[in-house]
Amino acid sequence: MVLKFYGHPFSTCSLRVATILKEYNVPFELIVVDVSKGAHKAPDYLKIQPFGQVPYIDDDGFILYESRAIGRYIAAKHRASGPALLPDVNTETQKYAKFEQAASVEAWNFDFYASKAAAELIFKPMRGLTPDEARAKELLESLENNLDVYDKILASQKYVAGDDITLADLFHISYGNLLHSAKHINLEDTKRPNVARWWKDITSRPSWQAVKGGVSSSA
Amino acid sequence: MVLKLHGFAVSTCTLRVATVLKELNVPFEFVPVDITKGEQKVPQHVKIQPFGQIPYIEDDDGFILYESRAICRYIAAKYRSNVSGPALLPDLSTEMEKYAKFEQAASVEAWNFDFYASNATLELIFKSIYGGGVTDEVRAKEYLESLEKNLDVYDKILSSHRYLAGDDITLADIFHIPYARHLHTRKYINLEDANRPNLTRWWKDITSRPSWQSVQGGVTSFP
């Protein structure tokens, strides 16, 4: 049975999962959850994803939510047929640990600021609400400070977990792209040459290129 | 050389790592970093932890790692054979779906619990203890409201299995303890609310473990 992907074509978390599915060429059927109509809060939906959030997958009956958990599951399950985006916890324990370190940095030092800034500056206006400009400014400042640290880290290694690309790099793309395209941050700033190099590298991957305009069912 | 844990004795993230070191019976030397004096921002520390944060570990072979939840996963993997019983970190090669459910629960801890709990703790508790400004009461109230909604969901989830990732305890349950403890003991949230019997059962269970009991007053070297 083909993997069922319950998501939304333009949602950042759906884009995150779709990118990873593409890395492994995993066929999937996108079933659109119409969040604008509150489909994600319907009782039937909450039975499966109790927080009323998108996306989730149904892989031949195995249900999983949380985009970064789905990403790890896909990378683990399909490791034989794609890039080694998730180091092996048993045979390369230190590499695995560095990946989880980078993934934790993505969560707490990047995403928490990036996603909340996007919520203020991009999603609120889309819903006809007024952004809290002061809060957005604070969030972007923290993000900028951390991107300066990223530049130092990426001066001595190609990717955020070391010299090989991992899921941790890919996790950044959807919110990074949202803020960068709207010019709230500049990930190609020449003052941060290593971040610029890294950003161009990861966003040029065919997986992201295939989904960045919106997710659709794979061929 | 014994594993060195560099952190602050009562810091939530340091406590998170210490709990898991105790769970896996891993001896360690505690090396204090005085965050009240800004020691985590000195050049020597920033060379190792470039974000100027704590904790980090230096394992017995010199391997350096930061980010408490990464450290916990590393410890649970490397020292797996120290203890019997279900693995705190399911093995993705032999129990892939269990591993995936663990990562789902860990992601829930990060985005649906910690974000609200850590920010509420900062506003309501840390600002007055450590300085850093006036409590933003409006924001704190928002965080607590979101947290309460999510705790209601936790109660539903925990009605059909014992722990967040299934019927076996995992790191995902333990990750919650330090911030949850702060908010619960100061009565900003009630994790033993009779209206949430499953959450109550879970909270009492995980906080009664000898690992947490032995570090909750502050981390020291072990043994």
Image (cartoon, rainbow, N blue to C red):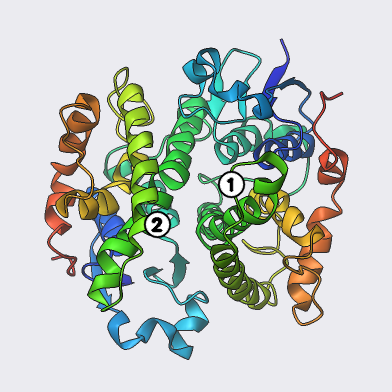
Query: Can you tell which mark lies on residue A135?
Result: 2
Q: Residue at x 25, y 57 (%)?
A: A26
Classed neighbour count for the residue bearing mark 2: other residues with Cα under 10 Å, few (<14), some (14–19), many (≥20)? some
Label 1 marks a residue whose chain is B
Q: Do marks 1 and 2 both belong to one polypeptide chain? A: no
Coordinates of residue B28 in the picture (x, y in percent): 76, 22
Residue type beneath disc 2: Arg
- Say left or right for B139 vs A204: right
Front of the two marks 1 and 2 = 1
Label 2 marks a residue whose chain is A
Image position of A1 with respect to B123: above or below: below
Query: Residue lying furthest top in this view?
Result: B1
Image position of B130 with respect to A5: above or below: above
User: CA separation, marks 1 and 2?
Assistant: 15 Å
Coordinates of residue B206 in the picture (x, y in percent): 79, 56
Q: Toward the viewer: B79 or B15?
A: B15
- Location of the N terminus of chain B by quadrant is top right
Circle 1 sits in a helix, a strand or a loop, which is it? loop
Q: Residue at x 78, y 65 (%)?
A: B187
- Say left or right for B95 vs A67: right
Q: Residue at x 81, y 58 (%)?
A: B185
- Location of the C terminus of chain B by quadrant is top right
Q: Residue at x 18, y 29 (%)?
A: A197
Residue type beneath disc 1: Gly
Image position of A85 with respect to B43: above or below: below
Circle 2 sits in a helix, a strand or a loop, which is it? helix
Coordinates of residue B83 in the picture (x, y in percent): 78, 38
Coordinates of residue A44 in the picture (x, y in percent): 46, 88
* Residue behind mark 1: B133
Q: Quadrant of residue A145?
A: top left
